[in-house]
Image (spheres, rainbow, N blue to C red):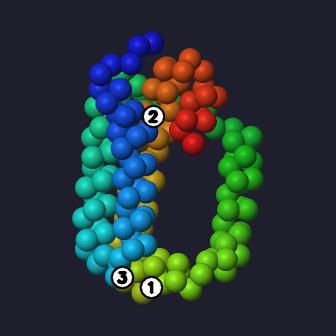
């Protein structure tokens, strides 16, 4: 199946522009003496997620991608998910200990520090999870699979 101009535009944005912007943003954050305010972060987050979702939905529409097919979950899927989830969550304290004091300080402004932080933090986590699944696992993977002709090269590119 062919990829439309909307699909190619989307692939360029998420495969080239997004990594470039992420690298630049990380460099800027390391060089900056102070972290952005939560308001600045929240505005940037909403803008980025909105642009990504808009581009993904446009590409999905023009390239006839079914983003929400009927699930086919079975017991094997649950075991596979747990095989990845348990070590990931279980090693968080260890991985946190590997960070330098400076890296921890830079991250603390983003993490919930008070009970009142959990509302916006859960909203950010929910929106990021949904939008990123649509963008990366829904549209990007499907388009690369069409371009490359197989699912495994698409997995490599998307990873």
Rendering quarter of residue 44: bottom left
Alpha carbon distance from label 3 to label 2: 35 Å
Q: Residue under label 3, please give it.
A: 33
Which mark sits nearer the N-terminus, 3 or 2?
3
As displayed, is residue 46 above or below residue 16?
below
Q: Which residue extends farthest front?
A: 31
Query: SS for tag 3?
Result: loop
As displayed, is residue 70 above or below residue 16?
above
Residue at x 61%, y 28% (from the top left corner): 153
Counting from the top left corner in percent of width and height, residue 113 is at: 44, 85
Q: Residue under label 2, please give it.
A: 140
Counting from the top left corner in percent of width and height, residue 145 is at: 53, 24
Regarding residue 112, the answer to whether it shows in the image is: no
- 20 vs 83, left or right, is left
Q: How crowded is mark 2: few (under 14 residues within 10 Å), some or many (20 or more)?
A: many
Residue at x 37%, y 34% (from the top left corner): 12
As displayed, is residue 112 above or below residue 125?
below
Query: SS for tag 2?
Result: helix
Query: SS for tag 1?
Result: loop
Residue at x 36%, y 44% (from the top left corner): 17
Alpha carbon distance from label 3 to label 1: 21 Å
- 132 vs 91, left or right, is left
Which mark identifies residue 113? 1
Counting from the top left corner in percent of width and height, residue 51 is at: 27, 46
Name the one closer to the observer, 138 or 36: 36
Q: Which of marks 3 and 2 is in front?
A: 3
Q: How crowded is mark 3: few (under 14 residues within 10 Å), some or many (20 or more)?
A: few
Which mark identifies residue 95? none
């Amino acid at each position: 199946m062919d990829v439309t101009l909307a699909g190619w535009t989307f692939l360029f944005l998420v495969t080239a522009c997004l990594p470039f912007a992420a690298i630049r943003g990380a460099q800027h954050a390391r060089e900056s003496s102070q972290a952005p305010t939560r308001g600045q972060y929240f505005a940037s987050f909403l803008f980025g997620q909105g642009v990504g979702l808009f581009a993904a939905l446009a590409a999905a529409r023009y390239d006839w991608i079914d983003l929400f097919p009927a699930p086919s979950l079975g017991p094997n899927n649950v075991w596979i998910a747990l095989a990845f989830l348990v070590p990931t969550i279980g090693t968080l304290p260890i991985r946190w200990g590997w960070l330098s004091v400076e890296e921890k300080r830079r991250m603390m402004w983003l993490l919930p520090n008070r009970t009142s932080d959990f509302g916006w933090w859960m909203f950010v986590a929910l929106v990021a999870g949904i939008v990123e699944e649509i963008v990366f696992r829904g549209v990007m993977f499907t388009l690369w699979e069409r371009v490359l002709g197989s699912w495994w090269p698409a997995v490599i590119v998307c990873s």
